[in-house]
Each structure stands twice: as C-alpha cells, then as structure tokens.
Amino acid sequence: MKRIDIVFPVYHGNLHEIEPCIDVVIPFFSNQLTDYDWHIVFAINGKDPEQIIKLVKKINGVHKSVWYDYAEQPGKGSGVIHSWSESTADIITYMDVDLATDIGNFPKLIEGIENGYDICIGSRYHQDSKVERSFKRKVVSIIYHRMFMKLILGAKTYTDAQCGYKAINRKVALEVIPLIHNKNWFFESELLYIAQRKKMSILEVPVIWKESKFSGLTLYKAIWEFIKSSVFIRFRKF
C-alpha cells in the first residue's frame, strides 16, 4: 500500500483553523483514500508553536494519522519544504489549512501522480474551475500570472503557481527541493519554474476555490516579493 503525506502549513495565527479543517478532511480522506496509507502533517513554522503542538497532540489522541513537523524559520515555504524533505511517503502533497480550495478534487491530484506526472497542481485558471474572490485579489493574480509568470519566468506548462493544492512524486521532490531558495510565498513559483526548466511533467486539475476571509498574505508586500524573486530566479543557473 502506497503512502501519502498531506501537509498543511501553519503558523501561530492559524490556530483557530486547525480543528475545523480536521473535521472536514478526516472523513473525506477516510472515504476517498482507502487504497492508501495516508497521514496528515501540520507543518508548523516560525515563532510560538507551543499552542499548535499541544492541539495537534490532542488531535493525535483521537486520530493517529495526524501529527506535526516544526521548522523554526518563519514562512509558508519553510514549513512545506521541511516537511516534504522529511517525508518518506511515495506521494507528497500540500493544501492550505483554510480549505479555500475545496478538497473534492484532491483525488485528481493523486490520480495525476499515479498516471506518471511528476507534479500535479490545482489551477484557478483551468477552464473547469469555479472561483470566488475579491476584485483586488483577482487583479493582482492576473497581473502576476499573466505578466510576470509568463513574460519573466516563461511559464508554458502551468497557469497557476500559487494555488495551495499540489502533489509531487517523492523522487522528483528529492531532486527539486534542494534547489528551492525561497522559504516564503514564492516557493511554489520557484518549484514549478525549476520543474519546467528540468522538463518535468506538470498536470493541472480544476478546483473550486473561494477566497478566505483570513489570510496571512499581505498582497502588496507579496507583489514586491514576487517581482523581485521572479527577476532573480530568471537569471539563476541550474
């Protein structure tokens, strides 16, 4: 039986989202992933992890498939990269704890990897996706994905780098992860850029995505990070 690790990156500000997330995902994975040995990993990053660790240990008392990993360096990418690096699962995945991306199409990510793709990602720009978000976030996303990602990074095999809905073959992860420098929000764009440069296969699946009212991402701060990081990685040698 193959193993799947499902990583949810969290920091102290996500404490209130963990139990509602568990209430949704445990029944779903129990029903949909019956052919796999699956585990949920809360990838904690940054300062003040104590309350989250205490909560996850409490949840583990009821659901043995739930545990945590801790990376001292703050940043979403730091948590995901650390957990992916430590994982021994055949298929490694990650989702956002706010479940802005509906879990209904999660099995399609796994199916994509099983069908031989190196990386499988959710895309809000897939023709079959259904997306609800504010005008501000829509404009920022279009500018980034259609301008910087296409023009600077030359993205051809993917349309949405930042959707928190990804799966990767473990062998591919071990090859790509050491090359990722960014440990914050840009790590996903870097992951896909490197994968494309290395001619790895990427499959996009449709998603149902609804903007979360709570977000640790400050849009205008993120814009500058994306611009700077896009230009930097464009001239990196691999």
Image (spheres, rainbow, N blue to C red):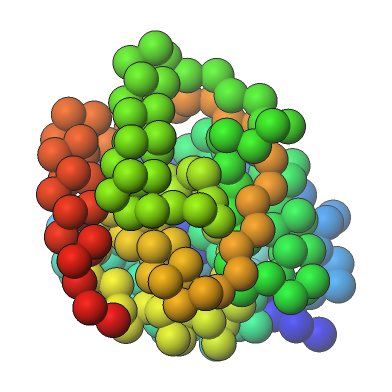
Measuring from the top left, give residue 30's x and y in whole percent: 79, 59
Residue 109 in sight? yes
Pick whichever, 189 or 95, lies toward us: 189
Can you give x and y, in whole percent of width and height, for residue 113 in the image?
A: 70, 70
Residue at 22% over, 78% down? 237
Q: Quadrant of residue 189?
A: bottom left
The front one of 66 and 34 is: 34
Residue 234 sits in quarter:
bottom left
Q: Is residue 159 above or below residue 55?
A: above
At x 48% / y 38%, what residue is drawn? 98
Image quarter of the C terminus? bottom left
Which sits in the foreground, 72 or 234?
A: 234
Instruction: Decide if residue 33 is on the left or right side of residue 224.
Output: right
Eyeballing the image, is 5 above or below 213? below
Q: Residue at x 33, y 54 (%)?
A: 153
Quadrant position of the N terminus in the picture: bottom right
**161 lies left or right of 209:** left
Residue at coordinates 21% horizontally, 39% vertically from top-left?
222
The percent coordinates of residue 168 (x first, y second) are: 57, 71
Q: Position of residue 48 (x, y in %)?
A: 18, 56
Would you say 79 lies left or right of 113 here? left
Against 193, residue 207 (above or below) is above
